[in-house]
Image (cartoon, helix red, strand yellow):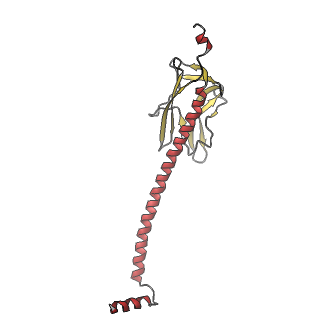
Amino acid sequence: MNRLKRQLSRKLNNNHGFSLTELLATIAIMSIILGVVAGGAAALIKVYKNIRLRADAQSLLSTTVMAVSEGMYTATDVKTSEDGTVTGFISEKLGDIYYSIGSETNTETNKTVYYIKVSSKEDGTDGKNIVANKTQTLDLSVAFKDADGNDTSPKYNADTHVFTYTITVSDESVKETQEVQVHSIVDVPAEETDGE
């Protein structure tokens, strides 16, 4: 026991420093620990970016659904094609509404982003992004598309006064889709009830 105390005391009071072997062993251990931590940090950053992108896609989807539904909720004089596809309508809140798909290219990433354009003219010349450009972040595209990526258009059932549409928000790695039904609260137009 005394011998161990003396060796320990000599070692602690030694002013010569560490041996080369001790230094190399310490550097090797620290390198292994640093490699594990750095690899874990890179994986965490990738997971964080994916979670953030999905959250932004869900937020953009929710914002777009609210913006599109707002006009449909008070729709009157709905114009449709023979198959029920909505070509335009008048919203008590927003006036004449025509939807189309617009696009713009991000100058930094050189990527084309699609968005739902709303205009008050049938030809869409005065159209603008239905949600604020600041809301449409991270080069996410928004369109009337189904879950398979096929183009769709809002439909209207004149008997039930219900709009049905599907919106998809996507980029290369994320795709969020929602099918929506909006019941117009406006009563049946007067010309339909005149004969009763």
Q: Position of residue 193 (x, y in %)?
A: 59, 11
Image quadrant holding the C terminus, namely: top right
Seen from the viewer's position, the closer of residues 187 and 164 is 187
User: Which residue: 40% across, 73% down?
Assistant: 29
Q: Is residue 195 above or below residue 62?
A: above
- Is any part of residue 101 visible from this angle? no
Q: Is residue 162 above or below residue 68?
A: above
Quarter occupied by residue 194: top right
Q: Position of residue 43 (x, y in %)?
A: 45, 56
Q: Position of residue 157 (x, y in %)?
A: 51, 20
- Is any part of residue 1 visible from this angle? yes
Residue lying at the far top in this picture: please name it.
Answer: 195
Total of numbered circles in the picture? Answer: 0
Q: Is residue 16 above or below residue 170?
A: below
User: Which residue: 46% across, 58% down?
Assistant: 42
Residue lying at the far left in this picture: please name it.
Answer: 1
User: Which residue: 47% across, 40% down?
Assistant: 175
Quarter occupied by residue 190: top right
Seen from the viewer's position, the closer of residues 186 and 77 is 186
Q: Is residue 16 above or below residue 68?
A: below
User: Which residue: 51% across, 47% down?
Assistant: 53
Q: Position of residue 2 (x, y in %)?
A: 34, 92
Seen from the viewer's position, the closer of residues 8 and 176 is 8
Image quadrant holding the N terminus, namely: bottom left
